[in-house]
Amino acid sequence: MRVSILASGSSGNITLLETERTRLLVDCGLGKRETLARLAAIEKNVEHIDGILITHEHTDHCNGLPQMLGLWKAPLYVTEPTMGALQRTLPETFGKRLKGVETIHAGQHFSIGDIEVHAFAIPHDAADPIGFTFRSNGAKMALVTDLGYMPELVKVHLKNSDCLMLESNHDLDMLKVGPYPWVVKQRVLSRTGHLSNHAVGEYLSDPDGFDAIARYLVLGHVSQENNNPYLVRISAEEALGRRSAECAFRGELLVASQDAPLRSLEL
Ligand SMILES: [Zn+2]
Ligand SMILES: [Zn+2]
């Protein structure tokens, strides 16, 4: 399985997952031109997509969906509440370009080609937000962004991942003194907002939470106002450094960017 995170952050999220037989997109938060430019940047020419999965209806995850449906005519995998929200918020072209909708729900396992997908609920202020794990050819990838805290059940789903993509959205101090209005700060900090570097650190340092099996640990959805990639990395490295030698993390720590695709990761 190959994972290409094309963009991650509050201005657009999109990830490509590939095996020899199957290609999936998770979220469509960039327009057609930018998506194609990023695919070209990592030397990918994608002619066919087997499925588009949407985590939740916030614009940074679905803005480009009508264009992507026009481009690839792929079936859409969404939960019913998210589909309702998409129909309310996206332009009419969305409905016109739909080529088929597979209704999924949190807790469900399903297959698309040779990729086995598991969807699970995450705490976020959207209609029915979900995270995913993907399994193929013995490899496992987990993708979880946009969540206010790490529920125990989510930690269980993330175990045994060869690649873990997790949100590290904001630095608590930067958020507190930053430019956001108070209500927005409250929203980000809430149990249905976003994970802070600190919350990620608590998870990464705890051997009962993070099992450190991952070959690639990717931190993403990094706020451009209230965080920066260096802080994300320093905070995560400090947290991983708190683990004892016998359960040390020996994989690679990466920070996904809003502005450029991450190199493709081979699992
Ligand atoms: Zn988001
Ligand atoms: Zn969101």
Image (tube, grey):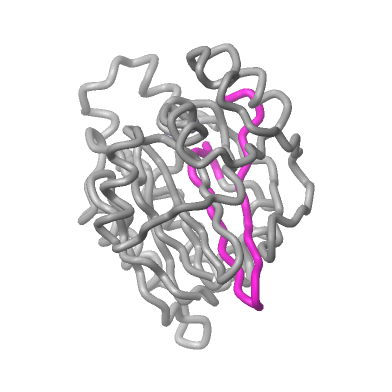
* Residue 256 locus on image (x, y percent): 32, 54
Give whichever of 197, 157 is nearer the camera. Answer: 157
- Using the image, determine if residue 189 lies above or below residue 95: below
- Which residues lie in the magenta part? 126-149
Find out whether residue 84 is within the magenta segment. no
Task: Verify whether residue 144 appears in magenta.
Answer: yes
Can residue 173 be seen in this snapshot?
Answer: no
Q: As drawn, is 149 to the left or to the right of 14?
A: right
Q: In this picture, is 116 found above or below 196?
A: below
Residue 30, position as x, y percentages in the image: 36, 36
> Residue lying furthest front in this view?
47
- Say which residue appears at 48% left-offset and 27% top-offset: 66
Is 93 rendered above or below residue 28?
above
Residue drawn at point x = 35 percent, y = 60 percent = 44
State the residue in front, 162 or 179: 162
The image quadrant that residue 170 belongs to is top left
Quadrant of the image for the N terminus?
A: bottom right
Q: Residue at x 63, y 72 (%)?
A: 160
Q: Quadrant of residue 94?
A: top right
| Residue 111 appears in the figure | yes
Asked whether, in this view, residue 252 is left or right of residue 23, the answer is: left
- In the rendering, at what x and y percent does residue 129 appear? 61, 34
How many numbered tags mark residues here? 0
- Measured as percent of width and height from the top left, residue 69 is found at 52, 34
Identify which residue is drawn at 37% across, 50% down.
220
Q: Residue furthest bottom?
A: 246
238 relative position to 23: left or right: left
